[in-house]
Amino acid sequence: MGYDFSIDDVAYLRSDAGRSALAFADSLALQPDTMLGDIEKLAKGYSPHQAALVETVTCRRKAVGKLRDPQRLLLTADALQQATAYPVADHRAAELAARYPGATVHDVTCSIGADLAALARTRGLGDVIGSDLDEVRLAMAQHNVPEAAVSRADALVPSSDADVFIADPARRSGGRRTFRMDDTEPPLLDVLDVYAGRPLVMKSAPGIDYTLLRERHGFTGEVQVVSLDGGVREACLWSEPAPGVTRRATVIRTGTNTTYEITDAADDSAAVDDAGIWIMDPDGAVVRAGLVRHYAKAHGLWQLDPQIAYLSGDELPVGERGWRVLEQLVYSEKQLKRRLAELDCGAVEILVRGIDADPDALRKRLKLKGSRSLAVVITRIGRRGVMFICEAGVRRT
């Protein structure tokens, strides 16, 4: 758990004296081997706020790459963990502007204002409102997003006539993550009930059981699974789905500045066949959203097995990484060790789906000594365990 900020801490950090103290704190290493000495230095000149200074600077450093302009933000450790990464927040804000042009948007669980900041800087939206029950986080949000109207309010008691509401029920406490719908604060299902009949966009855990959400709780909207740079970040629930869409995968890649989406409105009649030239593992958002067949059909690929997410084809989609098949063998650790040695393999990437095998433990047992780098895809086709010895590659254009 991080430091428990007081409202006085926040007022101090927002003051001229606090900004000067933060600049000094940021000049210190604040590493495990220097922390005691650094805290002593801060205590001499800035007591009783030395802990708040350490926590703020530490959080700002951790926020680099996740939040915009982190060196001016006030934030807590839990709030940082929960905060939406800015490329995801920006994408959602842009979509809100496209779906609801000119709309007043109310973030009813605004916390420190990560989503508020994206909404406030997006053209095409109207007024931006934020509210939260946590007075400390509200004060931080006022500092972080001064252009938004911020007030204290319970998310379960509607406090505005906004056109669209967004919510992000807390899924972490003391650094621990929860995936249960009943364990969020406020409860996810209660938020859905309170805003029933109003446009609501709600962030939830990427592992949410959206089938259960529909079947047992009557959710009729759209589930958008979002990944950022290869990691699945969230499932976003849209109470008003796009026409014909109930599931969507959104893949955001900052390195190449590309974003693509696929929905269940797309054709899913992908074939199942033997391996072609390439094998690829679709992005986690595509897999979590249950859109593997849709993605395969859209890119001229096919499945190796109808129950396994690995895809194959004679050409990779542009920008995607895959593995060029050299050999296909029946899965056998003994045979794999022998064959990799024959191929002069010294480093191997191991990917596993549908087979009970630990890639790291297997890699150690292989005891490779060669000079070549290869990849091994281990999976199940029907009831057979198979392995593909491959070379990694990426289609650039």
Image: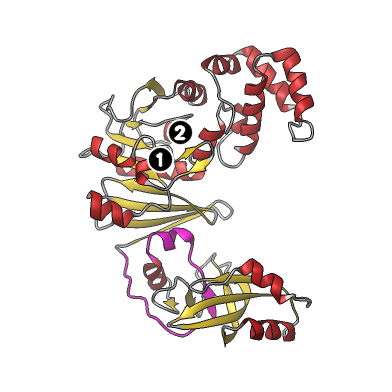
Position of 321 with respect to 289 (left or right) is right
Q: Which residue is mark 2?
A: 121
Image quadrant where one finds the N terminus: top right
Mark 1: give few (<14), some (14-19) or many (20+) Cα within 10 Å: many
Magenta stretch: dominant secondary structure: loop
Question: Of the numbered discs in the image, which one, if any, rests on residue 93?
Answer: 1
Residue 331 sits above or below residue 317 on the image: below
Tell me if label 1 and label 2 are in contact, CB under 8 Å. yes
Query: Where is residue 225 shown, x and y percent of the image?
Result: 40, 53
Position of 103 with respect to 231 (left or right) is left
Amino acid type indicated by mark 2? Arg
Query: Where is residue 13 shown, x and y percent of the image?
Result: 60, 18
Is residue 341 one of those drawn in magenta? no
- Going from N to C along the chain, the mark reached first, 1 or 2, is 1
| Identity of the residue drawn at 73% across and 19% down | 42
179 or 64, which is in the foreground? Answer: 179
**Mark 2 secondary-structure assignment:** loop
Query: Where is residue 379 shown, x and y percent of the image?
Result: 51, 77
Instruction: Please state the extent of the stretch shown in magenta in the rendering.
Output: 266-291
Residue 362 in view: yes
